[in-house]
Image (cartoon, grey):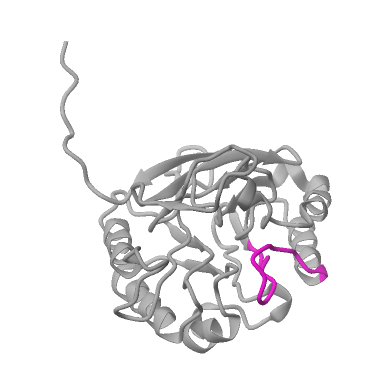
Amino acid sequence: MSGGPGAPPLLVAQFSDLHLRAPGLTANRIVETNMLAARAFAAFAALAPAPDALVITGDLADRGEAEAYRLLAGLIERHVRVPVILIPGNHDDRAAMRATLGDRLAADDEAGVNRPAEHLPVRLLPLDSTIGGESHGRLGDGQLRFLRDRLAADPRPAAILLHHPPIATGIAHMDAIGLENAAALEAAIAPHAARVAGLWCGHVHRMIHGRLAGAPVVIAPSVAHQVRFDLTPDGPSALVLEPPAFVMHRWDGASFTSQMVFVDSYPGPFPFLS
C-alpha cells in the first residue's frame, strides 16, 4: 500500500447495494441478489494484487432481514482477509445490523454504525446518512461533527464514505431521494477540501462521477442489479439486469484513480494484433 514514493499503491475495493434477502428469496421478485453477492465476493477473493480494504456503501440487505446479515457475515468470513467497512443504506435495519454484524461495527453511536479505518495511508471515514423508514438521506449533527473533527485532527488524506450521493445525477427519481442536506456536507469538508481524496457513495446503482467542494465524488454501481439509465425529467423508477460491477480505487500516494470492474468473466483476453 502506498505510504510514499516507491511504496506499492493502496487498493480499496468498493461494493455497493447488495440487497441481500433471507435464503430462497429474491429482490424485486426478479433479482437473485444472494447468488450475485456470492459471485462478487468470490471475484474479490480472486483479485491480484489483493486489495488492502473492502468498503460496502449501503443497502447490504433489501429488507433488513437478520438472515440477510447473517449471509453477509458468512460471505465476509469466507472470502475477505482485509479490513471491511460496512455502511448502512436506506434499505438496511440498524438494529439488525448491530445484532448480526456487531463485531464489525463501531460501538460509538456518534459515528453511526461504522468503524473508521485510520491505519491506512488514506483514512476511510464512514458516515451514516440513513433516516429510519425513509428512502432519502440526511447527515445528522453528530455525523457532521464527527467528520469535521476527524478532518481537522489529522492532515493525512481521507476518503469519505456514505450511502446517499451529495450530487445530482440527472436520474430524477433517484435525485429525489438523495442526500437532502448536501450543502451541510459541503460546508463541513470545504475547509479541509485539499485533504479529501474522495467521497464514495452508492444508492444510485450506476457508476457516476462528480465533484463536491472540489473533491471527487464516485457513485458505485451495484454488485446485483442496476438502475435504468434515463435522464428524462419524468423517467420511471426501474431496474435493469445490466452486468454486476464494483469499483477499485487505486491510491498512488497523491490521488485516487477509480475503475469499474465487472464481477463476471467475459471472453478474452486476446492479444492486440496488427
For this view, does 101 lie left or right of residue 197?
A: left
> Residue 113's x, y, as percent?
62, 76
Q: Residue furthest top?
A: 274
Give the quarter of the image for residue 37. Answer: bottom left
Residue ID at (40%, 68%): 27
Q: Residue at x 69, y 50 (%)?
A: 166
In this image, 20 relative to 191: left or right? left
Residue 87 appears at what percent x and percent y? 56, 67
Nearest the eye: 232 or 208? 232
Q: Quadrant of the C terminus?
A: top left
Looking at the picture, how far across and down is residue 224, in whole percent? 38, 58
| Residue 137, magenta (yes or no) | yes
Q: Is residue 180 left or right of residue 230?
A: right
Magenta span of residues: 126-141
Q: Quadrant of residue 211?
A: top right
Residue 12 seen in the current view: no
Task: Give 2 or 198, whichever is nearer the viewer.
Answer: 198
